[in-house]
Amino acid sequence: MKVFAYGIRDDEKPALKDWESQNPEIEVDYTQELLTPETAKLAKGADSAVVYQQLDYTKETLEALAAAGVKNMSLRNVGTDNVDFDAAKELGMNISNVPVYSPNAIAEHSMIQLSRLLRRTKPMDNKVAKHDLRWAPTIGREMRMQTVGIIGTGNIGRKAINILKGFGAKVIAYDMFPNKELQEEGLYVDSLDELYAQADAISLYVPGVPANHHMINKDSIAKMKDGVVIVNCSRGNLVDIDAVIDGLNSGKVSDFAMDVYENEVGLFNEDWSGKEFPDPKIADLIARDNVLVTPHIAFYTTKAVDEMVHQSFDAAVSFAKGEKPSIAVDF
């Protein structure tokens, strides 16, 4: 049995080596290149392909992979919104993702960023770097004094709620599919409008499906409290970035943290030092004292990477054996 992997990064190689040591009977080959119609032929002779990328898995790409004899594709990530499932179905492909690798990683990062915004660490760090050691006017706020609205109470959202409880913050939540335990705690509000009206800070933990596209927009921001803090470490297309910039300019939005961006492909995970920065909106946000920008790193921990590699390769083997892994995507 052979598994071929695309887009293997250097930081994934220790986890891959560990998986190989536990599965010596499986032949593994890989490339650092992403899966494209041109690179699909590299998987010829393999039983399954393991992939991770921000590029779309288009009909053309999936057809090329199938033409190479590979109809099992295991994603090393949770998001599947970039997969052409109609084409996959026509081709008779099997697809899996890693829906839960380390929800703590994303939850911790989002809450760390919220805390940093409240305590104004960015402008304070900039002052200290210039040897300005005066306190004022860089005064912060305490997390326990905030009402934090959590949108989406899946694995990650619930971890964020637990972190907030540790801080002593008041938590309110909204989810179209409520969690029974959180219902019993009385954390849910009945509508997003109610959450917008009550929350001092809002953090997103929902998928980037079409129904959620630009859920943070001009109209929804208008319904929020003046001086609201917004954190998005979920999916870039949840936020209309122009509406957030307008909110920051008017003061309606006091602070903003983003780890994802709708137009991040080709921008994030690239070194722009010494080069012309191609996105003036993100350049503007990076320059602001009340905005924190990270390049899609919320997931990026040793534990999460290990889980993403192990689970995806395990699923690839299951597919090759004619089995349906527990993390198979139904479509």
Image (cartoon, rainbow, N blue to C red):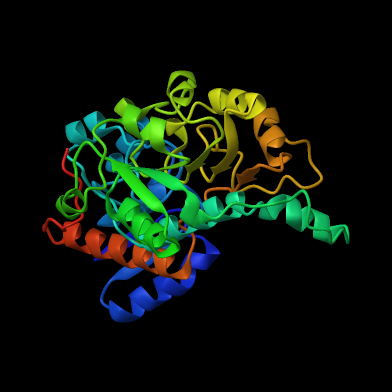
State left or right for residue 267 relative to residue 39: right
Q: Position of residue 324 (x, y in %)?
A: 12, 55
Q: Which residue lies most toward the left here?
A: 323
Quick one: 100 or 20, which is closer to the camera? Answer: 100
Q: Position of residue 47 (x, y in %)?
A: 25, 57
Q: Residue at x 46, y 23 (%)?
A: 217
Quick one: 328 or 129, which is closer to the camera? Answer: 129
State left or right for residue 326 relative to residue 132: left
State left or right for residue 242 relative to residue 308: right
Q: Which residue lies most toward the front here?
A: 145
Q: Position of residue 248 (x, y in %)?
A: 62, 30
Query: Quadrant location of the C terminus?
Result: top left
Q: Residue at x 47, y 74 (%)?
A: 14
Dividing the picture into quadrants, the one containing residue 234 is top left
Q: Residue at x 23, y 36 (%)?
A: 88
251 shown above or below 147: above
